[in-house]
Image: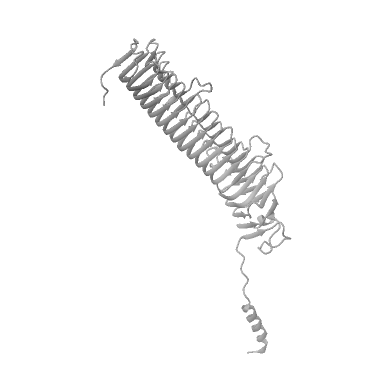
Amino acid sequence: MPTRLLPWLLVLLCACSRPAPRPQAAGELWVDRAASGGDGTRERPLRSLTEALARPGPKRVHLASGRYEGPFRLPEGTRLVGRGPATILAATDPGSSVVEATGDTALEALVVEGGGWGLEARGPMSVHAVTFRSQTRGAIRLDAGSLEGRGLRFEAGAAIQAPAVVGVLVEAGTAGASAPSLILRDSAFEGAYDRAVRARGGATVRLEGVDFQGPRMALSQEGGAAEVERARASGGTGAAFSTVEGALTLVDVRVQGHEYGVTANQARLSVRGFRSEHATRAGMGLTATTGLLEDVTVKDAGNYGALQLTASDLEVRRFRLEGSREYGVVALQGRVRLRDGVIQGVSTADGIAGDGLHLRQVDADVDTVTVEGAKGTCVLATQRAHAVLRDARLSGCGLAALAVDSKATLESRNVDVRDTPGSILVAIEEGQLQVEGLTVKDARGELISTDCEGQTRVRLRHVDASTTRGLRSPCVQLDARSPQP
């Protein structure tokens, strides 16, 4: 071997014997505002987040603790990961957004503070373990695409000034664009947001395990579809959950306070497990709405009734209404079917009135219902209503157990009335009352009270009562034959 090749062989052998440096993970950058400035590696992080975001290509940016002043724009493919509450993205200008994100992007484990909007997004986007606080317009605005959030916290801030600050706004940003969609899980809203979640223009929303404490409204939906499961709302002054011309599904939802637990107008509503306590007006106020409501509990509702149903087509199954003022159920126009329910303790503030079932200009079908302690009438059909009542247990009815007036019709079968100080049956103003299978015990008032004016009629069949007062009125017909099986 020529001697002049020997030095080159020695150099090559030395180079091969050195351990290879550990390769840096592709597309990963580190940023630390306390650093003096480096190349973006873990050992020598960049000082500027803006510089890191300007690097080309998809990337995962790791942010050290500290406060980073924006605004910031997240390019397509960017994942921004902080160190928890000690990593803060902020903007002091109330007219700017802290973060703008377009395309497939993500935020994780940090705080977004101040600015007009905390985040303006055009998804798909993922947001995990992020706190939004003290924005002047709203925490998140989703204009397009999808956004999925988990473990988020929204804090309105004690110094909130704007009257219509929202937590999350989901609305197509341009006319004709496809509607955006939001999925929010295991998250919480706190403070005086006007609407915690507002969905408009056909947007799709799913909320799971979300807690609302303080927003005026938890969900405001205008069109589109929304599903809410395992949600809690308290401390607000408006309707907790509201839909107009939308489809709303509620599963295991609880509301404390608020003006209404739920309102719906020209909507489709599905409920499987709902509880409202201390609503200042009504547990539910539903207008021109269709749907099925199951396992509904309303306690201590205001003077609009526990359930206020107007011009709707609804079925309510397994309901319990306690301590309402004015009405247990008030139904006006439309159709309603009530199954397997209990209504207790209905009274006005002065304690002299309060109807268990108040049926007005409505087609009602009621089966297996108990009404106890209504200061007014336990079941009232009025103003041309047509009601069918089966298997009812009525007790403590202050004015009457069953009453019809104003050309209404009430057909009842298998009615048990107990401990009632008022009249058992009342028919006036051309109301028509038909009762088959009536049992009366501990009655202190008369059996029938009627004015017998015009077309007023009372038809009875198979009556077992300790009193017969009123039975001889000219518009009362008693059929003593045994009831048909």
Asked if residue 470 lies left or right of residue 373, the reply is left
Image location (x, y in percent) of residue 384:
41, 18
Pick the front one: 57 or 474: 474
Q: Quadrant of the N terminus?
A: bottom right
Left or right, 266 with respect to 412, comes to right
The picture quadrant where one finds residue 157 is top right
**282 or 227: nearer the viewer:** 282
Residue 275: image location, x then y, percent: 49, 36
Residue 109, can we see it?
yes
In which image quadrant can residue 93 be found? top right
Relative to residue 54, is residue 153 depicted above or below? above
Query: Residue reaching furthest right?
Result: 36
The quadrant holding residue 21 is bottom right
Q: How many marks?
A: 0
Q: Position of residue 149 (x, y in %)?
A: 56, 48
Locate residue 478 relative to residue 54 in the image: left or right. Answer: left
| Percent coordinates x, y for residue 229 in the rendering | 49, 42
Give the colouring mode of the picture: one colour
